């Protein structure tokens, strides 16, 4: 496959991330009211602006757009530059500190390793931005894992943070591959295919646990088993996101309604789910009004180049 086609696939995943991110962000509010909106399949009044999830994914996409690989030093700087362009995009406290220190000339390798008293971050931030890597390298899972690890280490040196990035990028790669090859896959086989590519970790164990969770379970039960992202940790975010995507590979809109219904880390979970399922679903399942309403990353202040767009 030629480079231009790979870039277009990566761009498609980024588009999904931006829609899911802005969609999920729309549902932060009084719990009972949000549940009513979800039950009625109505989106609250919203600006459809995306958050740091998409901002960071734009930088990852641009790495692929320029050279087809992750240059860690360059990506670290671009993360910091884009953070400074608009600090009010929902960055967590640790991410803000890391990106600020990088911008002040700090060594990202040292800064990343020193997070959380030397353990490194196991937050979900590296997972939310890697969809374009999976889409770009969909036919080479070893390269997907390598590039995902490179992209994660800049801010998440902990094995859990890295595993989350690998899991989401592999899920996106498989969704892309199955769509291109017109292959049907069950949720079970999809999840099992991801698990075998993951390093031993708590995240891998919890993704494996999702195999025993029927889609018919009450969402409160699912939350108790798989988490809902409110801890902002990979183990609390990625297992549910992959489970949700696996059961909705052919239905983008249904995937997002299910994702937001858990009412946890809404923007991040929806960004992850959308970045995966947009690669495998029928284009008709992506509501036109969602596509037309979301903030356009192509024209965003966070874009460094408009090549190929």
Image (spheres, rainbow, N blue to C red):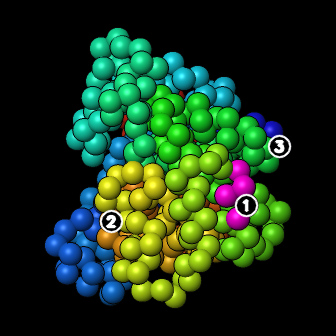
Residue that lies at the very extreme toward the top in this rendered image: 105
Q: Looking at this view, is 152 or 30 the one in front?
A: 152
- Is residue 236 highlighted in magenta? no
| Residue 297 percent coordinates (x, y) | 44, 45
The residue singled out by tag 3 in the image is 1
- What residue is drawn where x is 29% and y is 64%? 26
Q: Is residue 268 visible?
A: yes
Give whichever of discs 2 and 3 has the lower sequence position.
Answer: 3
Q: Secondary structure at mark 3?
A: loop
Q: Is residue 293 visible?
A: no
- What residue is drawn where x is 60% and y is 39%? 148
Picture quadrant where residue 82 is located: top left
CA separation in Å, label 2 and label 3? 38 Å
| Residue contact between numbered discs 2 and 3, judged by CB atoms under 8 Å | no
| Residue 121 percent coordinates (x, y) | 40, 38
Q: Say above or below: 107 vs 211.
A: above
Q: Say above or below: 251 vs 151.
A: below
| Residue 134 percent coordinates (x, y) | 65, 47
- Is residue 194 highlighted in magenta? yes
Q: Which mark identifies residue 193?
A: 1
| Region of the chain picked out in magenta, as a range | 192-197
- What residue is drawn where x is 50% and y is 78%? 254
Q: Which mark identifies residue 293?
A: none
Q: Which mark identifies residue 264?
A: 2
């Amino acid at each position: 496959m030629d480079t231009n086609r790979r870039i277009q696939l990566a761009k498609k995943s980024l588009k999904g991330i931006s829609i899911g991110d802005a969609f999920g962000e729309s549902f932060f509010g009084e719990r009972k009211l949000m549940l009513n909106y979800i039950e009625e399949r109505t989106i609250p009044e919203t600006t459809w602006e995306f958050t740091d999830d998409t901002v960071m994914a734009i930088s990852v996409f641009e790495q692929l757009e320029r050279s087809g690989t992750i240059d860690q030093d360059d990506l670290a700087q671009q993360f910091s530059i884009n953070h400074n362009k608009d600090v009010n995009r929902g960055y967590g406290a640790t991410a803000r500190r890391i990106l600020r220190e990088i911008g002040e000339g700090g060594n990202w390798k040292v800064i990343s390793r020193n997070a959380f008293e030397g353990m490194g971050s196991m937050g979900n931030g590296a997972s939310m931005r890697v969809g374009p890597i999976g889409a770009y390298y969909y036919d080479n899972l070893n390269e997907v894992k390598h590039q995902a690890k490179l992209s994660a280490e800049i801010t998440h040196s902990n094995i859990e943070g890295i595993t989350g990035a690998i899991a989401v990028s592999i899920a996106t790669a498989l969704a892309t591959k199955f769509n291109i090859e017109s292959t049907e896959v069950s949720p079970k086989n999809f999840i099992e295919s991801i698990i075998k590519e993951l390093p031993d970790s708590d995240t891998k164990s919890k993704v494996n646990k999702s195999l025993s969770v029927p889609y018919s379970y009450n969402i409160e039960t699912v939350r108790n088993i798989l988490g809902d992202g409110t801890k902002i940790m990979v183990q609390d975010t990625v297992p549910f996101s992959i489970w949700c995507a696996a059961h909705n590979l052919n239905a983008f809109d249904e995937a997002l309604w299910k994702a937001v219904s858990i009412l946890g880390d809404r923007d991040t979970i929806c960004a992850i789910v959308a970045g995966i399922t947009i690669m495998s679903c029928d284009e008709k399942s992506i509501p036109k009004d969602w596509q037309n309403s979301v903030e356009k990353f192509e024209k965003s202040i966070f874009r460094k180049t408009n090549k190929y767009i």
